[in-house]
Image (cartoon, grey):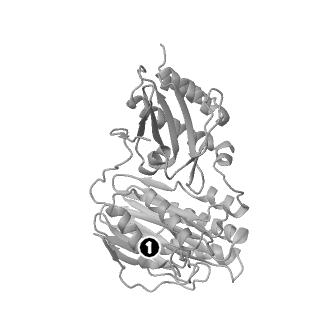
Amino acid sequence: MTLDPLRRLLHAAHLTPADRLAGVAAEQAAALGFAEMAIYLADYEQLSLIPVPGVGVPPRQELSVDGTLAGLAYRRMEPATSDRPIGGHRLWLPLLDGVERLGVIELLIDGSSPATHEDAAALASLVAELVVVKDAHSDLFARLRRRKVMDLAAEIQWDLLPPLTFASDRVVITGALEPAYEIGGDTFDYAVNGDTADLAILDSVGHGLRSAILASAAIGAYRHARREMHDLADISLQMNAVIAEQFAGSQFTTAVLARLDLSTGRLRWINAGHPAPLVLRNGSLVHPPTCRPSRPLGLQDGKPFPCEMRLEPGDRVLLYTDGIVEARSPQGHFFGEDRLGDFVLRAAAAGEAAPETLRRLMRDVLTHQADQLQDDASIVLLEWARNPLPLSGVTSEGAAAVNP
């Protein structure tokens, strides 16, 4: 039986190393009828799209996420096209692992080509999954994505993170952190199991390698206790014990540990000396019920008491570290909660996808502080809906025709 190009690509990928993936994918793209194909990966700051080299892959230049058709496909998570003077068109599609944005692919379609947009969407989906698989046992893609020297603390933290974005029909979770190449003690984690979404954001004291090691131990303890199916208070106790036993008394981690019942919207959390969550509802900023925070992890002297509230469908919950709201402008003005809430509310009103909202937010925070963050800055956005959410912007239909 003759295999179609997508099946051949899938079959060949089993023995294809990362450095040959772009070439093998381009070969099968040509068999589908595409004149050219190129893969681009987003850099760690999500400012640039970096071409992946390969045999048979046409040479390409690095592209900006802002102000290009490639960037438009990345930002909106939907295809974008441009016509060519000699016939046919150029098609850009986002590379999505689920709804996690990896980059884009570029496909050149001649006027007489039998290739369709459905073929392009299927190819993009397969290439995205293969990039994720090959990235697990190669340094190629990690090297390509670096536009600056990454310090050791940041190396540890990036390897510790889950995918920046997850979505199902009932919940969207997305996160961001800066400075991408020097992050130290800030990190986050999440897991969705059945009707339960667990989420944690941490800010370990200090900077650099020592802070990253502390954050790694805290996340390891969090995952271990969570997977043992402990409740929030016991998870907090176990994290506190690990930090207190393994690190000196001056070292600690502030955190919010949250758990959402996806069926009912019941949100419970433990605030361990951290900024309180913010809730965005129907175009307004809502402060959760007053709840006394416990001491930071590593310094607790008793079992913490969880806070609780009920979410309404469509609510967005923001968990963030103080590097967001305490980012200070050269004139001495803090970024602040109100500016943070207003930014996310305006993005939601404009129909902007959650991952793009946080990408732009981080740029705004950096601009506010004249591109010189004085502290790590991290944020996680969770959106809940009792009824299924339409995952707009992630389907292959309705490519937007955009002229250059």
* Residue 85 horizontal side relative to residue 384, left or right: right
* Residue 185 horizontal side relative to residue 233, left or right: right
Question: Is residue 261 among the parts visible in the rendering?
Answer: no
Task: Identify whether 180 is placed above or below 308.
Answer: above
Task: Identify whether 60 is placed above or below 352.
Answer: above
Q: Quadrant of residue 291?
A: bottom left
Q: Quadrant of residue 121?
A: top left
Question: Dot 1: few (<14), some (14–19), or many (≥20) neighbours within 10 Å?
Answer: some
Task: Identify whether 2 is placed above or below 72.
Answer: above
Q: Quadrant of the C terminus?
A: top left
* Residue 313 horizontal side relative to residue 82, left or right: left
* Nearer-the-camera pick, 141 or 48: 48
Q: Residue furthest top?
A: 1
Residue in the picture at 57% in, 50% down: 48
Residue 28 x %, y %: 53, 24
Task: Identify whether 186 is placed above or below 113.
Answer: below
Residue in the picture at 59% in, 72% down: 370
Question: Is residue 84 among the parts visible in the rendering?
Answer: yes
Which residue has dot 1 on it?
Answer: 340
Residue 377 x %, y %: 56, 70
Could you tell me how many numbered marks the image carries?
A: 1
Q: Check disc 1 and give the amino acid type.
A: Leu
Residue 386 x %, y %: 28, 60
Secondary structure beneath label 1? helix
Q: Quadrant of residue 24?
A: top right
